[in-house]
Amino acid sequence: MSRTPSTELQIRPLSAGLGAEIDGVDLAGEVDDATFARIQQAWRDHLVLLFRGQHLTHEQHIRFSARFGELDDHAAIPNFRLPDHPEILPVTNQEISGRKQPVGRQWHSDLSTTLRPARASLLRCEVIPPVGGDTMFTNMYMAWDTLSDTMKGIIEPLHAVHDMGAARHNRQRDPAELAAARKRNPPIAHPMVRVHPETGRKALYVSEMTTTGIVGLTEDEARPLLEFLYRHCVQPEFTYRHRWEVGDLIAWDNRCTMHLALSDYDIEVPRKLYRTTLLGEPSGRLVEEPA
């Protein structure tokens, strides 16, 4: 269905590595098809999109996100989604339903501990500390492209284990709660190099937050390789650091980026954002653990 055209769209790169700001569109209204097609192409080109001044309701946020594809209902992390809007995941340092929320303080790609890891995420800002609370993004196409041919040959056939239970950010959680979470999300082996289904480009797929090993390698063999890749993936020339403003909406493609929330602010000061997640393509396999 055709919609009334928006004002002229403007696209401005945010960094040399990735990211673009989109101006001239009101996401609370009906975005016409031609404008939406330009947004989709800009997303493929720049990996991360920023929309300023978008004061959306949950319903408007869900409606715009759903134009890109099927939304995840966050069943993998049911204790953290909004009860009335399961498509919405609060991203906050405050307590909701008596529990602190995860804030992603290690580099990661969303929901990599599932068999349908997130295709993309759209995060909007409602409350931000006066200082800090930034989010960083990195370009995993560039991380792959800049490896030596020899290193590419080593890692391309490999699969990395993504394990919610052994992830660094979960080690302090209540053991019973962690066991239940791990039952819903057992360890998954994903290819360390994924081919983007829309662009055909290769991207590294490892996560400092959730990758715990490499299939077929011992821990002593895997650790130095993973630590090298973690450092390599986040070189400054690959990254963009976003300083949030209330009303920002940022969309990123999890298949070719990683991100982290910096702990560069007073954690007693509220920080509240809301995320929708596009359901990803099937990927990986369950890891058989010793009995």
Image (cartoon, helix red, strand yellow):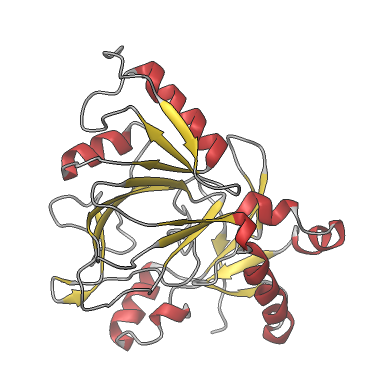
Q: Is residue 278 visible?
A: no
In front: 19, or 148?
A: 19
Q: Residue most toward the right? A: 150
Residue 150 horizontal/vertical position (percent): 87, 61
Drawn side of residue 157 relative to residue 95, left or right: right
**Figure label count:** 0
Q: Quadrant of residue 151?
A: bottom right
In front: 50, or 112?
A: 50
Q: Is residue 125 visible?
A: yes
The residue positioned 46% from the left and 80% from the top of the image is 168
Drawn side of residue 183 relative to residue 29, left or right: right
Check the picture and name the quadrant holding the C terminus: bottom right
Drawn side of residue 135 relative to residue 44, left or right: left
Check the image and report above or below for 215 versus 250: below
Check the picture and name the quadrant holding the N terminus: top left
The residue positioned 49% from the left and 64% from the top of the image is 108
Residue 102 horizontal/vertical position (percent): 32, 71
The residue positioned 74% from the left and 51% from the top of the image is 145
